[in-house]
């Protein structure tokens, strides 16, 4: 991370750009949640936008875009593997769920939207 | 008696390639990913495991009475606080301590706005409406996830306040070390913002 003034003003421009992007994407998240996509569409769209926003925060605010140290990238890579496993635990449990729940599994969005 | 000095607070460690505080912070954040990740996983399991109808069915967001306006407002508050936090670090890089302290102060102010909104406009009315954690799986998860997140905000407020006042004396002794400590505080602060970026759609919109 260079201490030179030119570097920092480049950083500051990136920060402002990310701020605008995050604000706009927050509005987009709310707007698209009003649209009813089929199946799990709403969940997918919301999570894709959230993941994109999160990666902007990680890349620019958390300086990962400029991060070169392998130790940090290794820690993140291992963390990502465990995180994926953690999120897949519910999928492994599908066979254990009561039958009516298994039936409703991919039905989550219509069920939520059903109340209008 | 000589005072022990922490090694590699400024210069990169020859093995890890970064100053040690930064690697330590990232390892801590990795453990935080596991903590919040487990709760998100519980959310997925309880949601897909909920019966399709009946009293135990997953509530529609009309039924939860969570306001996307309040959630959206707090999202913007946190995003702005992330900008002020990173601007504090940038100001230190430009050798401007007073500007950095102003940005840190703004960050604390925005954090307090977030907590007050959460408490006064959400938690208290929810409890008055008997939407307590024991009301349903949804509210159990809602209070666990947002409560844990709010505790993180509060923790950040204490740390940042420390660095505005007593902690800033380090600037005179070792400005680069102080700047690095602010960078690590910022890493934590942006992570807390990042968690909220997922919490907002998951709890308020879906």
Image (cartoon, helix red, strand yellow):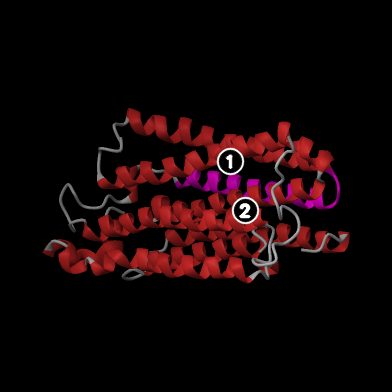
Q: Quadrant of the C terminus of chain A?
A: bottom left
In the picture, the disc for residue B187 is: 2
Q: Residue at x 67, y 34 (%)?
A: B162
Label 2 secondary element = helix
- Would you identify the image quadrant in which residue B134 lies? top left
Q: Main secondary structure of the magenta part?
A: helix
The answer for how far apart the CA atoms under marks 2 and 1 are is 11 Å
Q: Whole-percent x and y of residue B89? A: 74, 50
Q: In the image, is B14 to the left or to the right of A101?
A: right
- Quadrant where the N terminus of chain A sits is bottom right
Which residue is located at x 64 percent, y 61 percent? A21
- Is A85 positioned to the left or the right of B72 in the image? left
Mark 1 lies on residue: B156
Subunit ID for the residue under disc 2:
B
Element type at marker 1?
helix
Please state the horizontal and vertical placement of residue B163, each as a whole percent of the image.
70, 38
Displayed quadrant of residue B102: top right
């Amino acid at each position: 991370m260079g201490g030179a003034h030119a570097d920092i003003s480049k950083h500051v421009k990136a920060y402002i750009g990310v701020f605008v992007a995050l604000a706009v994407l927050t509005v987009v998240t709310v707007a698209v949640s009003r649209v009813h996509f089929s199946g799990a569409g709403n969940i997918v769209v919301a999570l894709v936008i959230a993941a994109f926003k999160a990666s902007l925060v990680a890349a620019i605010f958390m300086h990962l875009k400029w991060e070169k140290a392998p130790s940090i990238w290794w820690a993140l890579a291992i963390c990502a593997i465990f995180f994926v496993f953690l999120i897949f635990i519910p999928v492994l449990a599908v066979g254990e769920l009561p039958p009516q729940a298994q039936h409703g599994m991919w039905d989550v969005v219509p069920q939520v939207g059903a109340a209008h | 008696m000589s005072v022990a000095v922490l090694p590699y607070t400024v210069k990169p460690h020859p093995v890890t390639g970064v100053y040690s505080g930064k690697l330590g912070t990232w390892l801590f954040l990795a453990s935080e990913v596991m903590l919040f990740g487990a709760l998100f996983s519980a959310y997925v399991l309880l949601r897909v495991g909920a019966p399709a109808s009946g009293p135990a069915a997953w509530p529609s967001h009309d039924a939860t009475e969570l306001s996307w306006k309040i959630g959206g407002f707090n999202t913007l508050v946190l995003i702005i606080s992330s900008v002020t936090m990173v601007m504090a670090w940038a100001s230190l890089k430009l050798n401007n301590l007073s500007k950095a302290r102003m940005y840190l102060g703004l960050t604390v102010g925005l954090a307090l706005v977030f907590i007050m909104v959460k408490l006064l406009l959400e938690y208290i009315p929810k409890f008055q409406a008997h939407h307590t954690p024991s009301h349903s799986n949804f509210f159990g998860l809602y209070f666990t996830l947002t409560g844990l997140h709010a505790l993180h905000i509060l923790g950040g407020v204490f740390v940042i306040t420390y660095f505005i006042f007593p902690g800033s004396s380090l600037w005179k002794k070792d400005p680069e070390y102080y700047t690095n400590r602010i960078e690590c505080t910022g890493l934590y602060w942006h992570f807390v913002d990042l968690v909220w970026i997922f919490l907002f759609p998951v709890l308020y919109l879906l």
